[in-house]
Amino acid sequence: MRKIVVAATGASGSIYFKSLLDKLVRMDAQWDEVSVVMSDNARDVWQTELGDRSFDQYPFRFFGKNDFSAPFASGSGRYDTMIVVPCSMGTLGRIAGGISNDLITRAADVVLKERRKLICVIRETPYNLLHIRNMETVTLAGGIICPATPSFYSRPATIEEAALTVVDRILDLAGLDVNTYRWGDA
């Protein structure tokens, strides 16, 4: 069974965060615990993009952005996967620089030092050279960069369906068993 941390930063893309939480609720047989941490900006962006504040209605453990007593702030908490969705370039830069100034960046540092799975779902365009170098640094440290770039093979008909193509990819990268469109399937 799995222990997963899901973090949200203030980058645009609350639909990815919400869709991931929705899917994790339905996949509860595949994990023991899901813990969530959100930046203040993530809360504001959710409200702006999705029109409500329903993020706190999920059946997961929520932690404040500065709650360093959270179990995933230490390697002894044995969380095996961290997903940062959406991941702002500021957060990515702090992760790449080893700057643990809040619970999100501390948890990412812990996951990397313990050689566990860190998935950063970046949501920015275009990239500047600093973004690219930070992506390289995180990748070299063992993290996975997963741009929030929808695929269209499955012919998504709504924004939500397009977002789910990214979320399903995230779940695949996390090692969860997800029923999704697969290239070459009839």
Image (spheres, helix red, strand yellow):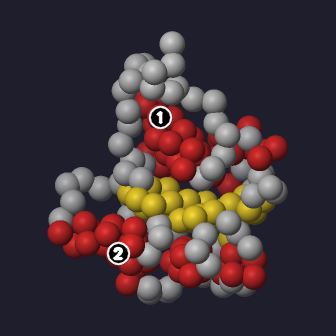
Question: Where in the figure is residue 54, as x and y percent of width and height?
Answer: 64, 48
- Residue under pointer 2: 137
Q: Nearer the viewer, residue 104 or 56?
A: 104
Answer above or below: position of 14 versus 120.
above
Question: Where in the figure is residue 8, as x and y percent of width and height?
Answer: 52, 61
Determine whether label 1 and label 2 are within 8 Å by CB: no
Question: Where in the figure is residue 11, as x and y percent of width and height?
Answer: 39, 59
Residue at 68% in and 66% down: 80
Whether residue 147 is visible to the viewer of this picture, yes or no, is yes
Residue at 39% in and 24% down: 153
The disc placed on residue 165 is 1
Q: Secondary structure at mark 2?
A: helix
Earlier sequence position, callout 1 versus callout 2 = 2
Q: Quadrant of the N terminus?
A: bottom right
* Amino acid type of the residue that numbered disc 2 sits on in the rendered structure: Thr
Question: Where in the figure is residue 154, as x and y percent of width and height?
Answer: 44, 22
Question: How far apart are the alpha carbons under marks 1 and 2?
Answer: 26 Å
